[in-house]
Amino acid sequence: MLRALGVADWAGMVRVADREPERFHQALLRETGFRFFRPYTRVVDESAGIEWVRWCAGGTTNATLNALDRWRGTPTWDKPAVIWEGENGDRRSLTYRELDREVCRLAGGLRSLGLRRGDVVAVCMPNVPEAFVAMLAIPKIGCIAMPLFSGFGAEAIATRVALGEARVLITVDASPRRGRMVNAKAIVDEALPGKHVDVDDNLFEVGVSSLTLTEIALAVDERYPGQVDIADIFDHPTLREIAEFMRRNNH
């Protein structure tokens, strides 16, 4: 950035950012290789007043394009994108290629539920790799991600889902927290009573649906009988542990 701006040090870069924001951000976008589907016409548009500044006016882009898609066909594609360690010491990693596969699978599943550009999708998940998948799959199809703290109670979830007008909420069956398994799905069920995925020809029930990996697996099996090994959806130890917990609790 120093070379791109023609300055000698950090203080010089800050001066350019303060005095010439358009020049600064133009250089920043160029140096980071930030991509757009449609190029912007102006980096900074203050025509409506400084309190209503529009950035990259006229351009269109996507978080998934820049975080994931841009690396396809490069050496980075087979390097780790997510390195995760659970509180019990379990470790998982996903390369960009593997992450892309999971993101595309979930994005396709969300589309099959009838979600379209501009719809709000709430995400109430613990810190697991699937949370990364969800947060990239949602913008990939043009939807708006609404993160919810996985420690929220039913009332807090219900209030935020209503205010945000979320059409779908993605959660987990259960997750470990401080040495014990927390039944996250039960909390979501209390927050959104009677509003679940309706597995029929449309695969979508108007209203809020709470989706878990178990329900997604069942939906896939019903829609594509005998064509998908459902065990593949629960293909790592953390998910097996969660599935076993749900079985023990008759869910």
Image (spheres, helix red, strand yellow):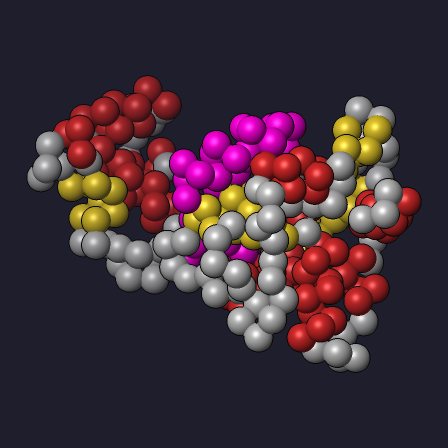
Where 54 sits versus 117, above or below?
A: above
Residue at horizontal 60 percent and vertical 48 percent from the top: 194
Where 111 sits versus 35, above or below?
A: below
Q: Give the image location of residue 123, x and y in percent.
A: 56, 43
Region rendered in magenta: 137-165
Asked whether 61 or 168 is in front, the reply is 168
Residue 36 in view in this figure:
yes
Q: Give the image location of residue 195, x and y in percent.
A: 57, 50
Residue at horizontal 19 percent and vertical 36 percent from the top: 53
In the image, taking residue 247 as reference, residue 141 lies left or right, namely: left
Asked whether 76 or 160 is in front, the reply is 160
Residue at horizontal 68 percent and vertical 60 percent from the top: 216
In the image, taking residue 226 as reference, residue 122 lies left or right, namely: left
Count of numbered labels shown in the rendering = 0
Where 192 sits versus 49, above or below?
A: below
Q: Give the image location of residue 186, x and y in percent.
A: 71, 39
Residue 145 in view in this figure:
no
Q: Give the image location of residue 185, x and y in percent.
A: 70, 42
Is 59 a magenta residue? no
Is 158 a magenta residue? yes
Residue at horizontal 56 percent and vertical 29 percent from the top: 155
Q: In which quarter of the image is residue 12?
A: top left
Q: In which quarter of the image is residue 189?
A: top right
In the image, taking residue 95 as reference, residue 19 lies left or right, namely: left
